[in-house]
Image (cartoon, rainbow, N blue to C red):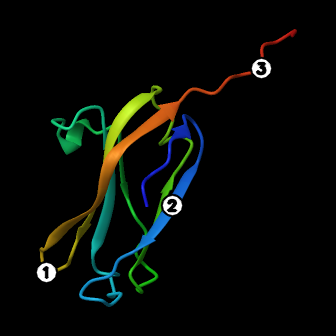
Amino acid sequence: MALSDFYRGETKKFYGVITYNGETPDITSDRVSFVMKNSLSDSDAEAVIYKEADTSAGDGRYDVTLSKDDTNIAAGTYYYELTWKRANGEEYVLEQGRVKVKERVEDVPGS
């Protein structure tokens, strides 16, 4: 599941299901986090978006909701990464890639 491009200032929701050794683990005590940065070399502190996923379903499913405020960033191309940190300290990259945040074409008053 690659993250699709989206418009700035819109709500973006996506989810996934983690499988580990062929099973869907209980991830309620784990952390799945989404980070979006201008550059691969940026620190997490410099991220334009950092969001913890909801892992309360417990069946390997995580849900990420980026609010309108979260996505109200400059239009452009960003790098993102989704990571899974298990309660025992193991950490896995679930997905990474590039995504475009696009500017909406707004109505022009009087046209």
Q: Earlier in the sequence, mark 2 or mark 3?
A: 2
Q: Where does label 3 land, which residue?
A: 107
Identity of the residue drawn at 60% across and 41% down:
10
Badge 1: residue crowd in 10 Å (few <14, some 14–19, many ≥20)? few
State whether residue 50 is above or below residue 111. below
**Label 1's element?**
loop
The CA distance from mark 1 to mark 3 is 51 Å
Q: Where does label 1 land, which residue?
A: 88
State whether residue 36 is above or below residue 61. above
Q: Quadrant of the N terminus?
A: bottom left
Q: Is residue 11 left or right of residue 58?
A: right
Q: Residue flagged by tag 3: what amino acid is it?
A: Asp
Identity of the residue drawn at 24% across and 88% down:
21
State whether residue 69 is above or below residue 2. above
Q: Residue flagged by tag 1: what amino acid is it?
A: Asn
Identity of the residue drawn at 57% across and 36% down:
9
Q: As drawn, which residue projects farthest toward the left?
A: 89
Q: Where does label 2 land, which residue?
A: 14
Q: Residue flagged by tag 2: what amino acid is it?
A: Phe
Q: Position of residue 95 (x, y in %)?
A: 31, 59
**Residue 81 appears in the picture as rendered:** no
**Label 3's element?**
loop
Q: Earlier in the sequence, mark 1 or mark 3?
A: 1
State whether residue 43 is above or below residue 28. above
User: Are the residues flagged by discs 1 and 3 in contact, CB closer than 8 Å?
Assistant: no
**Residue 23 appears in the picture as rendered:** yes
